[in-house]
Image (cartoon, rainbow, N blue to C red):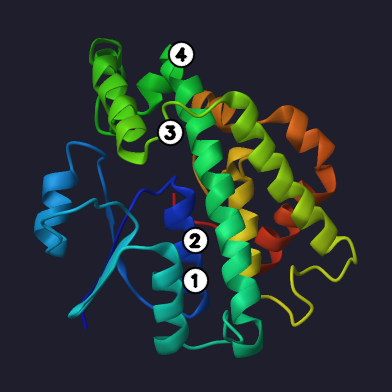
Amino acid sequence: MSRTLYQLSYSPWSEKARWALDHHGMKYTSVEHLPLLGEPFLRLRTGRLTGRISVPFLVDDELRMADSFEIARHADLRGGGSSLFPEADFEAIKRWNETSEGMLAAGRALATARAMADSEARREALPANIPNSMRGWLTPMADLGAAFLTRKYGYGDWSVEACTQRLADGLADLDRATDSGRGTVLESGFCYADIAMAVALQFVAPVDEAYIHLGPASRRCWSQPALAERFAAVVAWRDRTYSERRRPQPV
């Protein structure tokens, strides 16, 4: 069987897909995607020659999936372990995933704008195989990449206030859902809603390096200290969820 996940190791969307695949014990080969420059390769390898394409993208024999939610559903049907999509909770899980997607889109807009104004973050965004001595000269590549993402996802005109409010609204919803102390978003237990919302905090307070590696400047650009302090209980819930449910990633 040939199963390949095209991903960005630091991407929250890729993390949602990886977590679901790992939960179900599905073996796969990870291929790191390079934004902008790597898109022709991704199209060639996945057969998606027209339209917008992004990662995560799973190729599982003849099947092609280009969305974290779709990949997680596929893993639920084909993998082992407990279901992440109990039938009775499916509509609720979909709603929580929509909240997660909205938060991540807002967070990405804020983080990209900050990175474009942070020379250290732009250097960190360059491919890992570029020597440190050359990174200063090649930071315009990172500028092109950030501009490409802004055009691709259409958030160039989003206001800081609107993005911050979307994050705050999602955090407040999660705070209410987890306030009972049961440890999961839904009463029925751990499911994809927990994964989606735990990962949604990546643009508020990035998770520990053991799970997702970010350079110090990128971590700074992705953080929202005021929101993290205001919703400290939610951040603590996310940290417990990772500790109990997620294995550290290979270095």
Q: In x, y percent, where is residue 166? A: 64, 41
Which residue, given by chain and number where applicable, does mark 1 sit on? 20
Which residue, given by chain and number where applicable, does mark 2 sit on? 16
Which residue, given by chain and number where applicable, does mark 3 sit on? 155
Classify residue 70 by image quadrant: bottom left
Cα distance between the residues tagged 4 and 1: 34 Å
Image height of 78 relative to 184, above or below: below
Left or right: where does residue 228 sit relative to residue 126? right
Q: In x, y percent, where is residue 75? A: 42, 79
Classify residue 198 by image quadrant: bottom right
Residues marked 1 and 2 touching at CB (< 8 Å): yes
Residues marked 4 and 1 touching at CB (< 8 Å): no
Please tell me how crowded label 2 is: few (under 14), some (14-19), or many (20+) other residues with Cα within 10 Å. many
Which amino acid type is marked by label 1? Ala
Which amino acid type is marked by label 2? Lys
Cα distance between the residues tagged 1 and 2: 6 Å
Cα distance between the residues tagged 3 and 4: 16 Å
Cα distance between the residues tagged 2 and 4: 28 Å
Q: Earlier in the sequence, mark 4 or mark 1?
A: 1
Q: Secondary structure at mark 2?
A: helix
Residues marked 2 and 3 touching at CB (< 8 Å): no
Left or right: where does residue 145 sit relative to residue 236? left
Residue 215 seen in this snapshot: no
Residues marked 3 and 4 touching at CB (< 8 Å): no
